[in-house]
Amino acid sequence: MSRAKALLAPGLAALVLVCVLIALGIWQLQRLKWKEGIIAEIRQAQTAPPVPLPANPAPYQKVQIAGDWLPGKAALYGDEIHDTPNGPVPGGELLMALQRPSREIILVDLGWVPQQSPVALANPPSNPAGYLHAPLHAGWFSGKDDPAHGLYYTLDPAKIGAGMGLHNVAPYMLIAMGPMPPPGSAMPQPAQDLPTPPNNHYQYALTWFGFAGVLVFEFIFFARKRLQQP
């Protein structure tokens, strides 16, 4: 068998792999365009006013919920330290319960507060607005929830609601949005923006195309070396 024919099998294998790598790069460019469309929708929703909570809210839609706050029902989610004018202060996200006219209860994340045990606001905002958050479930590295003290590390409305002694809790949570309180205030710091997914598909495409280019040069080097052998 000639040396040129000996390169046929590795050449075909390299060609197939290069085609696969290029296809992956093109796929990432397609996902880039898809993700840019999602981000454009989020930016448009960011500037739109909130709408009354519909039966089936659209993704990335700001909504407003009417109802009555249940007095004394509060919990803290997470454990986060914020820098304040007086130095680092521990705290968490303050969760309170809002009962709609339908009797359904929605847990509302009013924002970060400098509390280590939950204290309900005496005058929470009426008709809070924000975005809906699907429930999360505990992972391997999640902190241990402490329902007895109203402290949670997993954003699970059913579990948090049960810890508050509530029933008919909605299977989602409202993340409140609004203006930031003055520096040093004990009031909650609500979310300022809708969540935006990361968009790294351009870098991923360059990586796959780069692997394809490296493979081509590696095969050229391999072939030249094989053909030069006596």
Image (spheres, grey):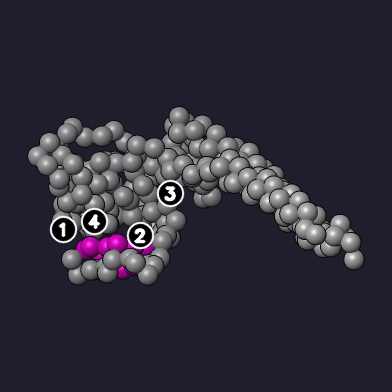
What's the residue at 49%, 44% (across, down)? 198
Which amino acid lies under the numbered mark 3 shown in the image of this protein?
A: Leu
Report helix, strand or loop for mark 3: strand
Numbered badge on residue 117:
1
Count of labels in the image? 4
Numbered badge on residue 132:
3
Residue count near mark 4 (Cα–Cα under 10 Å), binned few <14, some 14–19, many ≥20 = some
Q: Look at the image and give the residue range highlighted in magenta.
A: 150-164
Return the disc, 1 or 4, that comes first in the chain's sequence.
4
Q: Tell which residue pokes out farthest to the front in this image.
A: 230
**Relative to residue 67, is residue 226 drawn left or right?**
right
Report helix, strand or loop for mark 4: strand
Q: Quadrant of the N terminus?
A: bottom right
Return the disc, 1 or 2, that comes first in the chain's sequence.
1
Of residues 152 and 50, the one nearer the viewer is: 152
C-alpha separation, residue under disc 3 versus residue under disc 4: 21 Å
Q: Which residue is mark 4?
A: 79
What's the residue at 58%, 40% (across, down)? 202
Q: Tell which residue pokes out farthest to the left in this image.
A: 86
Which amino acid lies under the numbered mark 1 shown in the image of this protein?
A: Ser
Which x, y percent locates residue 189? Answer: 25, 41
Residue count near mark 1 (Cα–Cα under 10 Å), binned few <14, some 14–19, many ≥20 = some
